[in-house]
């Protein structure tokens, strides 16, 4: 690669620029803000600044990572796809089903490589979980519990959380879209999910215009029940899953990068690498995307797979409106 680019200037874009520089140290790296504005702040690991997608096309960049807010993903990606420039789109692929279907149609027409940035599939314990479930380690799955929670004001301490992408509906905020990793890896592990019921809540504590917690009851094609909980409220970050089957239970701690097997005989730690460098998820994802570009074997997340998560989220929002609750501190 001689010319690469990252669209967006947020935290994840900063990580992608750094990783691209490590992967392609001799490549020219273009950075572009989501709006096309010329940034006043220093943009680390960028050789040149671009102000439009058209400029990136003229410069014949060979790979672009779209790390703008979700509602702008299709707008930024479509022209690149039509120009035959491979794009890695950050999750969620889009904010609406209509946009993802348009992307699917154009990508199919132009045969341009497209992948979606669900990096948690590359977490070392995630790969172990995939293997264990594929080998029927727990036998017939009865039910699963999937949970993530982290206090939104702690996500970006240097910025008012109310001004963040996560807090604004117009930028694709809310627990459902911002925490869509859980929809992706659960369907990757268990297959397509069917929505049974959901409760979306908006507490006064954070004073957001979007849902700050979501509880879903879902089912798999084999009639296992999946309870999923997402929130912006837990003061200590929590990301764990529990899969219960006829032979025992697998407990997966994504933050601790550990898997435990629970049976009547006791608890067995099957995998534990708490110090594993999680940036390896992103570098592995990039390397996999390069393999896709070169038509080599890869495990990249397809548009069709990413569309499943967006479709499920849109169905939840349409069927179950947000409920405002008075619990928590009054917002100022």
Image (cartoon, grey):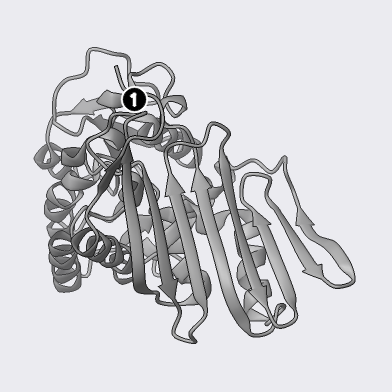
Q: Can you see residue 163?
A: yes
When asked about the image quadrant of residue 106, the answer is bottom left
Quadrant where the C terminus lies? top left
When asked about the image quadrant of residue 216, the answer is bottom left
Which element is circle 1 on?
A: helix
Q: Can you see residue 297?
A: no
User: Viewer-proximal residue, 189 or 220?
Assistant: 220
The residue positioned 43% from the left and 39% from the top of the image is: 20
The residue positioned 49% from the left and 87% from the top of the image is: 222
Q: Is residue 28 above or below residue 120?
A: above
Q: Is residue 74 above or below residue 129?
A: above
Q: In x, y percent, where is residue 296?
A: 45, 69
Q: Is residue 42 above or below residue 233?
A: above
Please give left or right for residue 179 compared with residue 61 in the image: right
Q: In x, y percent, where is residue 13?
A: 36, 35
Q: Residues within 10 Å of mark 1 (few under 14, many from 20)?
A: some
Residue that extends furthest to the front in the rendered view of this protein: 326
Q: In x, y percent, where is residue 285?
A: 48, 53
Q: Which residue is mark 1?
A: 161
The residue positioned 31% from the left and 22% from the top of the image is: 331
Please give left or right for residue 305 compared with residue 35 in the image: right
């Amino acid at each position: 690669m001689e010319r690469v680019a990252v669209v967006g200037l947020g935290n994840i874009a900063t990580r992608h620029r750094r990783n691209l520089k490590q992967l392609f140290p001799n490549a020219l790296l273009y950075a572009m803000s989501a709006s096309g504005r010329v940034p006043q702040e220093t943009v680390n690991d960028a050789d040149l600044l671009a102000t439009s997608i058209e400029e990136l096309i003229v410069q014949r960049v060979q790979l672009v990572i779209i790390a703008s807010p979700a509602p702008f993903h299709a707008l930024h990606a479509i022209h690149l796809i039509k120009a035959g420039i491979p794009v890695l789109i950050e999750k969620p692929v889009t904010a609406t089903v209509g946009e993802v279907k348009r992307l699917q149609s154009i990508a199919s027409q132009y045969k341009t490589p497209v992948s979606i940035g669900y990096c948690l599939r590359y977490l070392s314990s995630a790969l172990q979980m995939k293997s264990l479930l594929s080998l029927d380690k727990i036998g017939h799955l009865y039910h699963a519990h999937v949970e993530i929670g982290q206090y939104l004001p702690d996500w970006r301490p240097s910025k008012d959380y109310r001004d963040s992408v996560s807090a604004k509906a117009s930028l694709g905020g809310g627990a459902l879209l911002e925490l869509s990793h859980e929809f992706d890896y659960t369907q990757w592990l268990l297959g397509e999910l069917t929505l049974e019921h959901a409760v979306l809540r908006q507490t006064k504590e954070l004073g957001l215009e979007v849902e700050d917690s979501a509880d879903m009851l879902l089912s798999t094609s084999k009639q296992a029940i999946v309870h999923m909980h997402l929130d912006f409220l837990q003061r200590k970050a929590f990301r764990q899953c529990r899969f219960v089957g006829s032979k025992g239970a697998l407990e997966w701690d994504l933050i601790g990068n550990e898997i435990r097997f629970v049976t009547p005989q006791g608890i067995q730690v099957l995998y534990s690498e708490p110090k594993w460098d999680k940036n390896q998820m992103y570098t592995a994802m990039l390397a996999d995307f390069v393999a896709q570009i070169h038509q080599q074997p890869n495990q990249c997340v397809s548009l069709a797979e990413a569309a499943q998560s967006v479709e499920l989220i849109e169905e939840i929002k349409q069927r179950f409106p947000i409920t405002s609750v008075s619990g928590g501190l009054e917002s100022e």
